[in-house]
Amino acid sequence: MRRSAALVSIVLAASTLWACGGAITAASQDRTAEARRMVDSQLRGRGVRDERVLAAMLKVPRHRYVPREMQRSAYADSALPIGYGQTISQPYIVAFMTEALKIEPSDVVLEIGTGSGYQAAILGELAREVYTIEIVPELAERARRTLEAEGYRNVHVRAGDGYKGWPEQAPFPKIMVTAAPEEVPPALVEQLAVGGTMILPVGPRMGDQELRILTKGEKGIMTERSLPVRFVPMVKPPSGPEP
Ligand code: SAH
């Protein structure tokens, strides 16, 4: 009697596992199809050409970087809320900014504004090391956990103020800022390597911002103005006594 009850529960457990396995496979196939559509229509269709960038955008599962209730919309052509009043950028903007940096496999990249960790994962696919700073400690911790679960050993997350950069690891050949300061932060220009490139949105809190691409030469900085954009503001932490 007892033995047959045990058998039934094993059979039940096995069939439940099988059913879950089936569901997971179907869901992940859907996600792969969604990622492919995103790459074809939102990225290739709008002129993103760098095959390494396109491959990274296809590979990184964007839905794992957004809160559960947003997962259905993860591949939509828009920014999405990730909590704490912050957003994950629209896929096209992620791809556009990444392509503009022309990342080499040997590059070390600084990112300001970790948010969900999605952009950091894309950078992690393309660069040797990624250092990323997030001012909201809860978001930094969540992104750190997601990136670890996704297997990125080359992405390093710090909770702190991006205006200061990451001096211990400077200079950086590539810097990407994903929150908008009103002016280009001087410490970041300083931490950009000679011959390096930085991309960042600049502009007023609620108003029109523009993407700028800065390159640092022997004789100074060259600035190219690019797309009009709207990013969350890069906030200044309340000023207190210097440590
Ligand atoms: N790159 C992110 C999206 C960025 S949203 C992603 O892929 O999901 C912008 C982020 O910048 C927010 O999480 C915000 O908290 C952070 N931020 C704003 N001001 C900052 C500062 N001074 N230093 C570091 N991070 C900052």
Image (cartoon, rainbow, N blue to C red):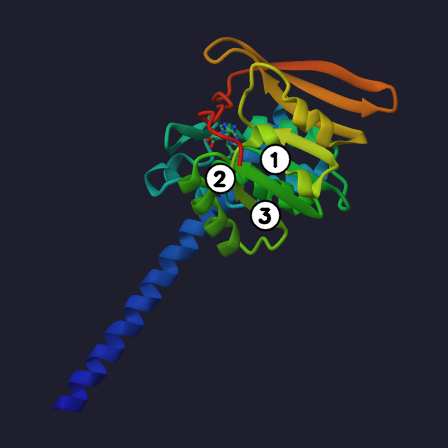
Residue at (20% x, 80% y) in the render = 8
Q: Is 2 or 144 nearer to us in this picture?
A: 144
- Give the quadrant of residue 108: top right
Which numbered disc, 1 or 2, marks the residue closer to the eye? 1
Q: Earlier in the sequence, mark 3 or mark 2?
A: 2
Which numbered disc, 3 or 2, marks the residue closer to the eye? 3
Which residue in the rendered view is the most extreme toward the top?
207
Q: Is 79 or 146 nearer to us in this picture?
A: 146
- Give the quadrant of residue 69: top left
- Which residue matches tag 1? 111
For residue 74, above or below residue 1: above
Q: Earlier in the sequence, mark 3 or mark 1?
A: 1
Looking at the picture, how far across and down is residue 172, in whole percent? 73, 37
Which residue in the rendered view is the most extreme toward the left?
1
Amino acid carrying label 2: it is Glu
Amino acid carrying label 3: it is His
SS for callout 2: helix
Amino acid carrying label 1: it is Glu
Looking at the picture, how far across and down is residue 228, in whole percent? 58, 13
Residue at (56% x, 56% y) in the render = 151
Q: Is residue 229 left or right of residue 10?
A: right
Residue at (77% x, 46% y) in the render = 106
**Distance Cα–Cα, label 3 vs label 1:** 10 Å
Instruction: Inspect this view and state whether residue 50 appears.
Output: yes
SS for callout 1: strand
Q: Which mark is residue 127?
A: none
- Which residue matches tag 2? 34
Q: Is 124 or 194 nearer to us in this picture?
A: 194
**Distance Cα–Cα, label 1 vs label 2:** 27 Å
Q: Earlier in the sequence, mark 1 or mark 2?
A: 2
Q: Is mark 1 within 8 Å of ligand 1?
A: yes
SS for callout 3: strand
